[in-house]
């Protein structure tokens, strides 16, 4: 036994390296999944904010045309400067509704012609 060199087995080290490498890969995948979840949550918040903003804008816009009828009669009596401002406000409201997709192109054209005539 004295003449033989001592042989050291390396398998325990290889096993530890494999376990440690798996742990590191799993941890990286976990971090990536957390980042993806956070990005999805942020996107959901942005979408919710936009939807709530659009619904808040839609409520006054729906009330706007009902109020536009009496408002048209008042500025015509008030004078040309008031009439032009009201006309521009109505056209900008119509344009906003058209851009948001609340009005079709035909509806937009008809409403615009009605505002310009009256």
Image (spheres, rainbow, N blue to C red):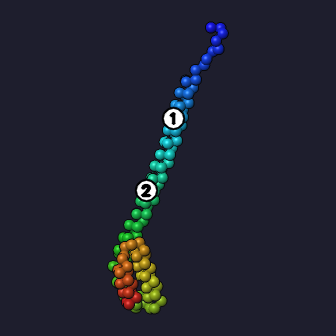
* Residue drawn at (38%, 87%) of the image: 113
SS of the residue at dot 2?
A: helix
Residue annotated with mark 1:
22
Q: CA distance from mark 1 to mark 2?
A: 33 Å
Which residue is at 39% across, 72% downward?
Answer: 101
Q: Residue at x 35, y 80 (%)?
A: 107
Q: Is residue 65 above or below residue 117?
A: above
Could you tell whether 23 is left or right of 57 in the image? right
Viewer can see residue 60: no
Marks 1/2 in contact by CB < 8 Å: the verdict is no
Residue 78 point in image, percent of width and height:
43, 90
Residue 44's disc number: 2
Q: Is residue 39 left or right of residue 115?
A: right
> Horizontal and vertical percent for residue 114?
36, 87
Name the front one of labels 1 and 2.
1
Give SS at disc 1.
Answer: helix
User: Looking at the image, which is closer to me, 89 or 19?
Assistant: 19
Task: Please name whichever residue, 19 or 54, is drawn nearer the observer in this view of the structure.
Answer: 19
Counting from the top left corner in percent of width and height, residue 46 is at 45, 59
At label 1, counting other C-alpha atoms closer than 10 Å, the crowd grade (few under 14, some 14-19, many 20 or more) is few
């Amino acid at each position: 036994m004295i003449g033989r060199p001592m042989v050291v087995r390396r398998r325990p080290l290889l096993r530890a390296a494999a376990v440690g490498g798996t742990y590191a890969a799993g941890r990286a995948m976990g971090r990536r999944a957390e980042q993806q979840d956070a990005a999805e949550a942020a996107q959901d918040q942005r979408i919710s904010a936009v939807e709530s903003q659009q619904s808040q804008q839609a409520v006054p816009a729906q009330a706007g045309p009902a109020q536009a009828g009496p408002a048209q009669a008042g500025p015509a009596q008030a004078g040309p400067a008031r009439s032009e401002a009201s006309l521009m406000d109505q056209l900008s409201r119509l344009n906003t509704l058209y851009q948001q997709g609340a009005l079709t192109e035909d509806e937009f054209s008809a409403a615009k012609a009605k505002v310009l005539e009256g």
